[in-house]
Image (cartoon, coloured by chain):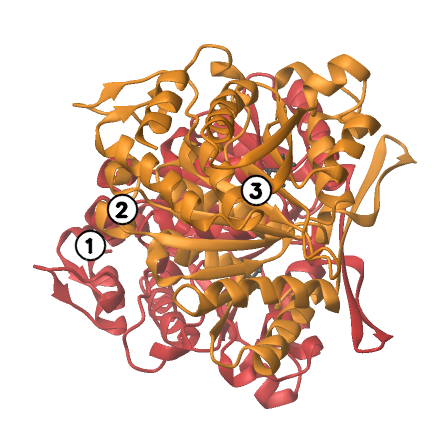
Chain colours: A orange, B red
Amino acid sequence: MATHKLLLLPGDGIGPEVMGEVKRLIDWLNSAGIAKFETDTGLVGGSAYDAHKVSISEGDMAKAKDADAIIFGAVGGPKWDAVPYEVRPEAGLLRLRKDLGLFANLRPAVCYPALAEASSLKREAVEGLDIMIVRELTGGVYFGEPKTITDLGNGQKRAIDTQVYDTYEIERIGRVAFELAKKRKNKVTSMEKRNVMKSGVLWNEVMTQVHKREYPDVTLEHQLADSGGMMLVKWPKQFDVIVTDNLFGDMLSDIAAMLTGSLGMLPSASLGEVDVKSKKRKALYEPVHGSAPDIAGQGLANPIAMISSFGMALRYSFDMGALADKVDAAIAAVLASGLRTADIKSEGTTAASTTQMGEAILKEL
Amino acid sequence: MATHKLLLLPGDGIGPEVMGEVKRLIDWLNSAGIAKFETDTGLVGGSAYDAHKVSISEGDMAKAKDADAIIFGAVGGPKWDAVPYEVRPEAGLLRLRKDLGLFANLRPAVCYPALAEASSLKREAVEGLDIMIVRELTGGVYFGEPKTITDLGNGQKRAIDTQVYDTYEIERIGRVAFELAKKRKNKVTSMEKRNVMKSGVLWNEVMTQVHKREYPDVTLEHQLADSGGMMLVKWPKQFDVIVTDNLFGDMLSDIAAMLTGSLGMLPSASLGEVDVKSKKRKALYEPVHGSAPDIAGQGLANPIAMISSFGMALRYSFDMGALADKVDAAIAAVLASGLRTADIKSEGTTAASTTQMGEAILKEL
Ligand SMILES: CC(C)[C@H](C(=O)O)[C@@H](O)C(=O)O
Ligand SMILES: CC(C)[C@H](C(=O)O)[C@@H](O)C(=O)O
């Protein structure tokens, strides 16, 4: 059995708590002889700043580059609101994405039937929802230069951010979307603002070409990002795979997540290109939710998004799709049994702490 | 009685139809001696392209600069998908906004009780909703330079858009938001992505200063635009006034509009700075909905957003708040009577065409 190297980066707030439940799962997989994971741990975000005055240390970056997959908790919190921009907690995550070339962010928005009621949307609008948002993650306004604030004198400053996209960046994220669609409902919706942004014009043009040239059998639709956002709220089930840029993806995937009513349940995967020689790809898995500093350390956090992110690692990094299916099934079974952490509790369900939820899922496995 | 000069720009698709109902209202106000409007009409968008190969002619731009207010329908449609970028229908609208300095876009998102059922959200989440989105409209990535597509050779192109914000641009839109909040629930939520964008850092800083210096009695909250979008979907009633940049405002105001379930009902106002001498400000009023080419010319369009936009003109350009209130009340009364255009019809209501709806509102007045 191959040994897989994991780097665990719990981060801040509820990060360490939810990561604890993944650690429990990994330990069990190892001891039961189902898989062989070697784990190391590092600091990222505010916790790295507290220890080393950086958002991630060079040592931990080296470990990240060396790992087969990174399991990431969450970063940030009011404690670090005043730290310099360059070392703010988020910078650690952004550097991991950029330096490891994790250009493809996969964010499934799935509505667990047991939780449909938790959505602010009507049940019929979200029950059975299963869409995949594919967000470009290493380009656009997140990393384009110049990115500056200049003092113009007279109390005036000028802030500049730059959105940059090259053809190849749009092509490769397009391919990820089309490949995923082939295994799903065979439909891709590309979203941009071509009526206002030149990057939207190029995005639209390149998606159309990739489709025509390489994936003519998949359905491709184009939608302006603003009306796409509206359609997402109006009738999300019309979508299968949505592909969009870094900033629109940030907004749209969060909105899609909220539609499901299950923010504490949703995982994500950030993938790099497949290396021609080793056939491996760099990858980072993280929950969609944030560090929730207000409930940190109280055993209130929902570990499902984190465990489910580890499930995505099994699927996308280690070709253990069957095991990933079992993890998903265990989560669904525990939910069906009525166990709920505080964020998703409702009448007639049984309250569970972070640990109790993690243990129940493991037991189900 | 002062004479007010209006320029009507119906535009494309359903624009002319819904504008017809505003024209009917204006004619009545004139003939009943309630107000004195002088109206002129121009071409914008695809209709201007068909006539003059531009998205708005210099003659119509001159008329626009001369008018006390512009009443704008909608632009665009598949017919003009292939026209050159510089003369695409949207360019006419963008030029009007920029050249007239219409920096403040006011987009109320109000849920009419009679229509709460039309929302994809649960009734309790949207009934009674009344928020105001204040969107910066002449800056940011919409107009920043460079905005280019460059051929890099080898089949590669590079697209660039530039987000630029100066202190004064953020200050003046901030003031608009705080002033509005004072007449409402006294709360402003500012949204940006300061954790990723330098323009977000400056936006946050300037809003904080304007608040401290000029509006300490209004409550100011800051939210990241992505989580702000989530909060909007989760529980929109937590907001009063939201102030945000051009691109985030485009996304967030459309999403807010869709929450109400009444997209065909929502107006908007785009305002310039008040001239020190004349005490006047340039202004353009337009519905939030688009040109809906699929239903154009069939008498199916809902004229309420357009009429309500004219109502905003009465309020913000002509200091006729009492008359604007009457227009709003007439719309509410007609809805309560059960009259519905196709977009908002439901069981037990009475179908109305564009004209029938316009006439009913006028009769109510
Ligand atoms: C933490 C932050 C930098 C990040 C982003 O904006 O990408 C987050 O919102 C996300 O969506 O992963
Ligand atoms: C038509 C288009 C250019 C415009 C925009 O993006 O601003 C529209 O979506 C709007 O919100 O008014």
| Pointer 2 or 1: first along the chain | 2
Q: Mark 1 = which residue?
A: B335
Quadrant showing the C terminus of chain B: bottom left
Q: Crowdedness of circle 2 by 10 Å Cα count: few (<14), some, many (20+)?
A: many
Residue A116 shows in this picture: yes
Image location (x, y in percent) of residue B194: 68, 34
Report the amino acid beneath label 1. Answer: Leu
Residue B271 shows in this picture: no
Look at the numbered disc 1 and give the secondary structure of its residue: helix
Residue at 21% from the left image edge and 23% from the top image edge? A349
Subunit under mark 1: B
Subunit under mark 2: B
Report the amino acid beneath label 2. Answer: Tyr
Image location (x, y in percent) of residue B305: 37, 59
Evaluate if marks 2 and 1 touch, with contact meaning CB atoms under 8 Å apart: yes
How far is disc 3 from disc 2 in space, using C-alphas?
63 Å
Evaluate if marks 3 and 2 touch, with contact meaning CB atoms under 8 Å apart: no
